[in-house]
Amino acid sequence: MNETILRFGYPATLIREYEHWVVLLRGAQPALGSLVLAAKGEARSFADLPEAAFAGLKAATADIEAALGAAVGFEKINYLMLMMVDPHVHFHVIPRYDGEREACGVRVADKGWPKVPALGEAVELDAGQVEALAGYLKGYW
């Protein structure tokens, strides 16, 4: 796994692994169920991903949207490719909703709704919450 994936807490945060991608629980939750979809290779530019990785996005995003739809009941979903600090190709996946959602004792209000996600106001998860919420979300795959 590349350095970016490790910085997002792999393997503790792993929800699902695909041939070219991993889905990780985001340790900072601006909305409940926030994830990181990270490319497994060393690509630091979206255009540098192998062709098969682009094809793999179809399955990964379809699974993400089905799982988060069932687990969180989002109204919209945002895929943010920021790559400002962590250099390898990855998306922050933020399910969006009006109000609050709760699972495993973690309650998160989408404070940016209906505009840009409030990334700076995210709920920081501790190790126990990461384990519980990751297990909860894995059950929807």
Image (cartoon, rainbow, N blue to C red):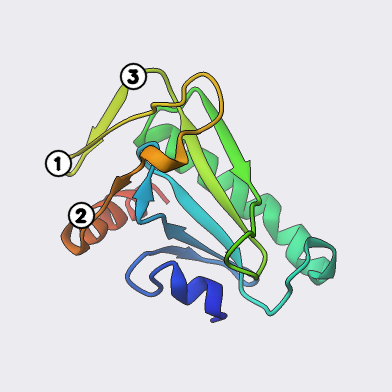
**Disc 3 and disc 2: Cα gap in Å?**
21 Å
- Residue that numbered label 3 is attached to: 99
Residue at 67%, 65% in the rendered image: 89
Q: Nearer the viewer, residue 71 or 85?
A: 85
- The N terminus: image quadrant: bottom right
Packing grade of label 3 (10 A; few <14, some 14-19, many >=20) is few
Residue at 39%, 36% in the rendered image: 31
Residue 105 circle label: 1
**Disc 1 and disc 3: Cα gap in Å?**
16 Å
Quick one: label 1 or label 3, which is nearer the N terminus? Answer: 3
**Disc 1 and disc 2: Cα gap in Å?**
8 Å
Question: At label 1, which amino acid type do we have?
Answer: Gly
Secondary structure type for disc 2 = helix
Question: At label 2, which amino acid type do we have?
Answer: Gln
Residue at 55%, 50% in the rendered image: 92
Residue 30's quadrant in the figure? Answer: top left
Packing grade of label 2 (10 A; few <14, some 14-19, many >=20) is some
Residue 88, x across and y down, in percent: 65, 70
Residue 17, x across and y down, in percent: 51, 68
Residue 56's quadrant in the figure? Answer: bottom right
- Residue that numbered label 2 is attached to: 129
